[in-house]
Each structure stands twice: as structure tokens, then as C-alpha cells.
């Protein structure tokens, strides 16, 4: 009798492999509803749409019509604001809470009482984050592009639209990479947002300026390689500091290798997040006497 009960328990704890997509969809739907019901999404959307005001203010406040270079304004805004500022911010705002909220409220042991693969649970919640944040960031990028067409040298011609699509694609790729890192921080640390700000806005910025190949350990190193750029072997960038001026040699990475590297980063952090969920789940279960 005991053997029969144990066999039934093992069979229940190991769901059929063919149902994996169903488990991912269930976790995705649950997380999507939670994200859409929270007020933070309104705040995040408002902050993300603020760059649209930059070209609009230039168009209305410019002393002469078409005085500003719309293509340059859009390029600088897409690279420095959408890609390097808003993408990490959205990741910390949402992805860090995918697992972190359940751990902080100590409800993860109850959330995972169903026989669902932990990887499917993490992947489904991550896909919900990815969908919501991608829609917000792409909408902001598209509206910024539309506003920049009021300036000179930018229009809705196909060549310019391809530039918009290129930046939207890179921004979405960055959301996935930063989101995987933020999800891992949420599953392993108690203060994921604070640590994430230090890593993404502190250490990452410093690493990009330090001579050598330290910048290869940052996500921005690979997202920058996906941006429209001249095909060169290496560049020498002059950096000015209070101690003087020095040259930082930047080794170029092809777009293909950068995409592969980002894919590996995303997969590695999601796998590490799944492992952390399993460890923390068992620890919580033991703590409550499970």
C-alpha cells in the first residue's frame, strides 16, 4: 500500500512532458493578469513615454522650422534613452519582481504546490514580463520616431522606417537580456532593485570605460554591437578624466556574435533563476514544516 502511494506521488510530481507548453501558458496568463492589474504599469508607461516630449519641444520651440536634425535626435534618444536607460529600468521595475515578490511575501511554497515544472513557471512569468515591457518600449520608440519627423532629415520613408525597426529590435533584445539578469537577482537577493541599479547603472558604466576587455562582461557591450555602425575592426575612443586623457581601445564584435552572446546570457540567467527557485522553494518548505 505504501509503495502504491509513493508511486502515485512520484507520478503526480512529474507531469507529462507534452503538457510543458500548457504549464508555460498557465504561468504566462497568471503573471500577465497580475502585471496588468498593478498600478506600477501605469507609472512605467508614463516614464517610458517621456522621451516623446524631447523632439516635440524642439519642433515647437525651435526659432526656425526644421532647424533640428530629426535623424540625429531620434538616434541619440533611441540609443542613450530607450536602449541604455529605459530598457534596464523596465527590467528592474518588473523582472526583478517575477520571483522576488513571492520570496519576499514567503508565498512561493504555496505558489508552487501544483505539479508544474519550475522552469515552465519561470519561463511563463518571464514571457509575460517580456510581452508587456516590449509593447511599452516599442510604443515609446515609435512615438518618438513619429515626433522626430516634425524635424528635418527624418520622414516615414522606408529607409528611415527600417532604422526605427532596427532600434526597436535591439531594444527588445536588451529587454530580454536585462530582464533575465533582473529575474536572477530577484530570485537570489533580498534587494534586487538596489543591486540591479548598482550593477547596471554603476558597474556597467564603469566597465565600459575601463581599459582592456572588462566591457565584455557587460550586457551593453553586446547590445551596442547590434546598433547600426560602420564595419571596423577596432576603435580608439578618447576618454577625459580628472587625471588626464587616455585612449581606450574598443574591439568590435560582429552583430551575429553579439546576438549569440546575448542568447547565451538570457538562457544562462533563466536557468540559474530556475535553480534558485528550486533551492529557495525547498528552503521555504522546510521552514514552514513541509
Image (spheres, grey):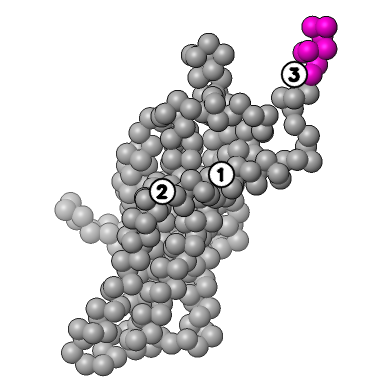
Q: What is the crowding at mark 3: few (fewer than 14 residues within 10 Å), some, or many (at least 20)?
A: few
Tell me, yes or no, if residue 190 can be seen here. Answer: yes
Task: Determine the CA span between mark 3 and mark 2.
Answer: 37 Å
Along the line of sight, the residue nearer the viewer: 15 or 250? 15
- Residue interval drawn in magenta: 1-9
Along the line of sight, the residue nearer the viewer: 29 or 47? 29
Residue holding disc 2: 38
User: Which part of the image, by quadrant, shows the C terminus?
Assistant: top right
Is there a contact, CB below 8 Å, between mark 3 and mark 2?
no
Query: Residue 44 sits in which quadrant?
Result: bottom left
Element type where label 3 sits in the image: helix
Q: Does the magenta stretch include residue 7?
A: yes
Along the line of sight, the residue nearer the viewer: 272 or 145? 145
* Above or below, 126 relative to 117: below
- Which mark sits nearer the N-terminus, 3 or 1? 3
Mark seen at residue 30: 1
Residue holding disc 3: 9
Task: Determine the CA span between mark 3 and mark 1.
Answer: 26 Å
Q: Residue at x 54, y 26 (%)?
A: 110
Amino acid at each position: 500500500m505504501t509503495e502504491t502511494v509513493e508511486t502515485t506521488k512520484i507520478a503526480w510530481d512529474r507531469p507529462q512532458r507534452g503538457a510543458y507548453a500548457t504549464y508555460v501558458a498557465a504561468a504566462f496568463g497568471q503573471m500577465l493578469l497580475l502585471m496588468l492589474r498593478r498600478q506600477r504599469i501605469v507609472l512605467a508607461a508614463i516614464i517610458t513615454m517621456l522621451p516623446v516630449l524631447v523632439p516635440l519641444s524642439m519642433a515647437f520651440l525651435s526659432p526656425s522650422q526644421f532647424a533640428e536634425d530629426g535623424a540625429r535626435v531620434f538616434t541619440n534618444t533611441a540609443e542613450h534613452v530607450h536602449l541604455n536607460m529605459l530598457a534596464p529600468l523596465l527590467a528592474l521595475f518588473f523582472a526583478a519582481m517575477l520571483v522576488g515578490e513571492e520570496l519576499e511575501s514567503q508565498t512561493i511554497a504555496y505558489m508552487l504546490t501544483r505539479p508544474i515544472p519550475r522552469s515552465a513557471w519561470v519561463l511563463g512569468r518571464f514571457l509575460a514580463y517580456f510581452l508587456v515591457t516590449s509593447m511599452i518600449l516599442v510604443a515609446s520608440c515609435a512615438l518618438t520616431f513619429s515626433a522626430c519627423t516634425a524635424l528635418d532629415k527624418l520622414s516615414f520613408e522606408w529607409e528611415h522606417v527600417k532604422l526605427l525597426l532596427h532600434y526597436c529590435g535591439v531594444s527588445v533584445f536588451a529587454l530580454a537580456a536585462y530582464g533575465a539578469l533582473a529575474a536572477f537577482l530577484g530570485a537570489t537577493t533580498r534587494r534586487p532593485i538596489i543591486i540591479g541599479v548598482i550593477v547596471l547603472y554603476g558597474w556597467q558604466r564603469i566597465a565600459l570605460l575601463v581599459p582592456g576587455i572588462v566591457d565584455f562582461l557587460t550586457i551593453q557591450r553586446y547590445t551596442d554591437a547590434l546598433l547600426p555602425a560602420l564595419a571596423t575592426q577596432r576603435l580608439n575612443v578618447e576618454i577625459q578624466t580628472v587625471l588626464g586623457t587616455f585612449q581606450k581601445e574598443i574591439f568590435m564584435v560582429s552583430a551575429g556574435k553579439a546576438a549569440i552572446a546575448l542568447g547565451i546570457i538570457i538562457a544562462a540567467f533563466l536557468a540559474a533563476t530556475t535553480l534558485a527557485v528550486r533551492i529557495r522553494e525547498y528552503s521555504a518548505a522546510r521552514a514552514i514544516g513541509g
